[in-house]
Image: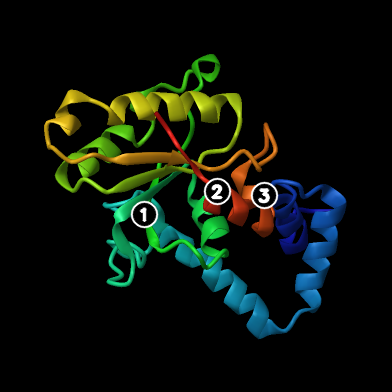
Amino acid sequence: MGAGPIDQLIAHLSRLPGIGERTATRLAFYLLRANPQFREGLASAISNLSHIHLCSHCSTVTDQDPCSICKSHLRKRDLICIVEKPSDIYSIERLHSYGGLYHVLHGLLSPIEGVAPSDLRISHLMQRVVENPPSEIILALSPTVEGDATSAYLVKQLDSPTLRAGGRKITISRLASGLPIGSDLEFADQITLGKAFEARTLVG
C-alpha cells in the first residue's frame, strides 16, 4: 500500500505524545467520516499555529503581542506567577481564582541535561522585575528535583542587591506541598492545584 492521504495522516498522528499507531488509525478514520466543516476547522486551527510567537512581556505563546492576559486591565499587575511552560498557564486559569500576571521560563534547570540559566527566560524575568517590581512573585513550578533547583536559583537571584536597592520588598511564595512529589503541574487536578495556590508558603 502506497503512502496515500490516510497513511500520511496516520503517520503524523502516531508521532503525537501518547498516540500509538492503532489509536492514530482510529483517529484517521474518524476524521475521514467526520463532517467536512469539522475537518476544515481542524486544518485551519493547525495552520494558524504558524502565527504563534512568544509574548514580549511574559514569554507565553500567543498570536498577539502582548498576549491577552498581559494587556488585560483586569489583572493584578503587581502579582507575577512563574511557571515552567505555557500549558501550565491553562491549568492555573481553569481555577478561575488567580488574577495576576505570569512569566514562562520554558524549562527548568537541569545540569544533567545541560539546561543552564541562560537557556531559560530568567534574564528576561529579572529585567521585568527590575523595571516594574511586583509586590509578590509566586513560584508555581513542579515539585521535582529540577523544579526545586530552579526555585532555589530564582529566590537567590530575586534577593540580589540590585533589587534590594530599589527599596521595595518583594514577597516570594511557593505553592503548598499538596502537590504530589515528582509530579508535573500540568497534570495536577484542579482541587489539589487550587488548594496549593491558596495555601502557598513564603520563601525566605
Q: Position of residue 139 (x, y in %)?
A: 45, 40
Q: CA distance from mark 1 to mark 3?
A: 26 Å
Identify whether 135 is placed above or below 98. above
Q: CA distance from mark 1 to mark 2?
A: 33 Å
Quarter of the view holding residue 39: bottom right
Q: Secondary structure at mark 2?
A: loop
Residue under label 3: 188
Mark 1 or 3 closer to N-term?
1
The local crowd at label 1, few if under 14, some if 14 to 19, many if 20 or more residues have their Cα within 10 Å, is some
Say whether residue 8 is left or right of residue 83: right
Q: Secondary structure at mark 1?
A: strand
Of badges 1 and 3, nearer the viewer stands 3
Residue under label 2: 199
Identify whether 204 is placed above or below 2. above
- The residue under label 1 is which amino acid type? His
Mark 3 or 2 closer to N-term?
3
**Which residue is outermost to the top?**
112
Q: CA distance from mark 3 to mark 2?
A: 15 Å
The local crowd at label 3, few if under 14, some if 14 to 19, many if 20 or more residues have their Cα within 10 Å, is some
Residue under label 1: 53
